[in-house]
Image: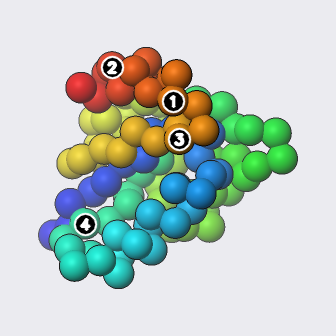
């Protein structure tokens, strides 16, 4: 059974979240891990909202930060364009 990775992001439709699923799937441990859940704090204007991003990537959207933390085996806190939010977004997962 694959380990379930959850993405936590300020807004999900960004380079890292768009490219990591394929990179993980094709990587040396792709048979052991998968992006399974995602949560975003707020969609960015002009970007795909969480439900659309999840549908495009075959990932289950989570309604809350607590839900993605509870369901996931491991987590990625993203928000690369907004590093000032990392501590706040990582507080509960840590």
The reply to whether discs 2 and 3 touch (Cβ–Cβ < 8 Å) is: no
Q: Earlier in the sequence, mark 2 or mark 4?
A: 4
Distance CA(mark 2)–CA(mark 4) = 23 Å
Q: Residue 39 carries which label?
A: none
Other-residue count near label 1 (Cα within 10 Å), few / some / many at <14 / 14–19 / ≥20: few
**Vertical relation: 13 (above or below) 63:** below
Q: Nearer the viewer, residue 84 or 25?
A: 84
Q: Which of 63 and 45 is in front in this view?
A: 45
Residue drawn 83% across the image and 47% down it: 46
Residue drawn 39% across the image and 21% down it: 87
Q: Quadrant of residue 25?
A: bottom left
**Vertical relation: 24 (above or below) 66:** below
Residue tagged by mark 1? 83
Residue tagged by mark 2? 91
Residue drawn 28% across the image and 35% down it: 70
**Vertical relation: 75 (above or below) 92:** below
Q: Earlier in the sequence, mark 4 or mark 1?
A: 4
Please identify the quadrant where the N terminus is shown: bottom left
Between tags 4 and 1, which lies in front?
1
Residue tagged by mark 3? 80
Distance CA(mark 2)–CA(mark 1) = 14 Å
**Vertical relation: 29 (above or below) 12:** below
Residue tagged by mark 4? 33
């Amino acid at each position: 059974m694959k380990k379930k990775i959850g993405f936590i992001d300020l807004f999900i439709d960004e380079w890292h979240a768009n490219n990591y699923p394929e990179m993980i799937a094709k990587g040396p441990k792709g048979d052991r891990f998968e992006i399974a859940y995602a949560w975003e704090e707020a969609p960015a204007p002009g970007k795909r909202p969480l439900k659309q991003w999840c549908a495009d990537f075959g990932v289950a959207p989570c309604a809350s930060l607590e839900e993605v933390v509870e369901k996931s085996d491991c987590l990625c806190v993203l928000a690369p364009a907004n590093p000032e939010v990392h501590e706040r977004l990582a507080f509960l997962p840590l």
